[in-house]
Image: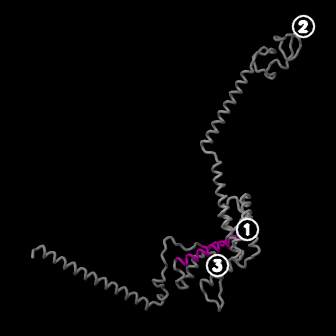
Amino acid sequence: MSETDLLKTRLDALEAENKQLHDKVKQIETANQEAVSQTLRTSSPAAERQPTQSQAHTHIVGLKPPGHLTLTPDSQKIENWKTWKQQWANYSLLSGLSKLNLDIQCAMLENCLGPEALKTYNSLSYSDEETKSIATIMNKLEQLFIGELNETYERYIFNSRKQLTSENIETYVTELKMLATNCNFCACMYDSLLRDRVVIGILCSDTRKRLLQTKNLTLQSALDICRADEATANRMKNIDRPSHEDVHQMRAKGKRHQSSKSTHKYEKHVSSIRDCKFCGKRHEMSKEKCPAYGQICSKCKGQNHLATKCTNKKG
């Protein structure tokens, strides 16, 4: 066997030994980690409350808890609560928070409520029959923040809502749907009531006429007609709006017209200057421009001419 072959054989043997040592070290580290974990679980009572790996938060990029609940102004309190409640439910589900124990969920809820709403949270009380849970807490908060709704008043607000000049049809319908959440409309009448409010409340009378002429009008078909008319109106505005070239042409035409008008006035002015038979000077043929107008002739005592231009033979 050559010297090269011997060296190769030794290198292979060394690599095999290194691999065996690496595997043994890894096994020892794993065993140590398991021993430490077992010791912590058995020696610390608080460890029993720690979530297992299956209970840990799900990591979703960009997922953030809802911001603090704002209760002012009072007119926005109900809407703010509903929005915050929806954000909390989504966060609790997506983050895996709903799978953790109640203490952790309550701690996160207190943190998200913020200092203003936390005062209300701390005032909650529970009867012996009630089981404390996130659902119970949310129901109690809703009763305090919203109270008992006045259905008649809420429906009055809904039926009085008209489209604003700054709103397109999508924004208007979204606002109507938000108002409808407080009206206790039954599911079977929801779409028809919303459709009727759209027909009555939209700004464009021509679109309203089309809606009233459409047989078997549904909410979806009403929205389709409104969107189509709105898009057509926007396109017509763009068509009717003059282009930059048109504006420049109109300005140039105006300047030419003004220049022509000035030239015509000058020519008229020049053509009206003649030798005056009353004063002997050259000026526009207007009595106001004549120096002799209103004067008395020194020869004949006549008016409106000078003696140098007097034609009275008696003088």
Mark 2 to mark 1 CA distance (whole Å): 99 Å
Q: Position of residue 137 (x, y in %)?
A: 62, 83
Give the residue at mark 3.
119
Mark 2 to mark 3 CA distance (whole Å): 117 Å
Give the residue at mark 2.
314
Q: Position of residue 130 (x, y in %)?
A: 64, 89
Relative to 264, does residue 176 appear above or below in the rendering? below
Indicate whether residue 210 is drawn in magenta: no
Name the secondary structure under disc 3.
helix
Residue numbers of the magenta segment:
68-94
Relative to 226, does residue 311 appear above or below in the rendering? above
Mark 1 to mark 3 CA distance (whole Å): 42 Å
Q: How many tags in the picture? A: 3
Q: Are marks 1 and 3 in contact (CB under 8 Å)?
A: no
Label 3 neighbour load within 10 Å: few <14, some 14-19, many 20+: few
Relative to 258, does residue 157 appear above or below in the rendering? below
Give the residue at mark 1.
196
Q: Tell me which amino acid carries mark 3.
A: Lys
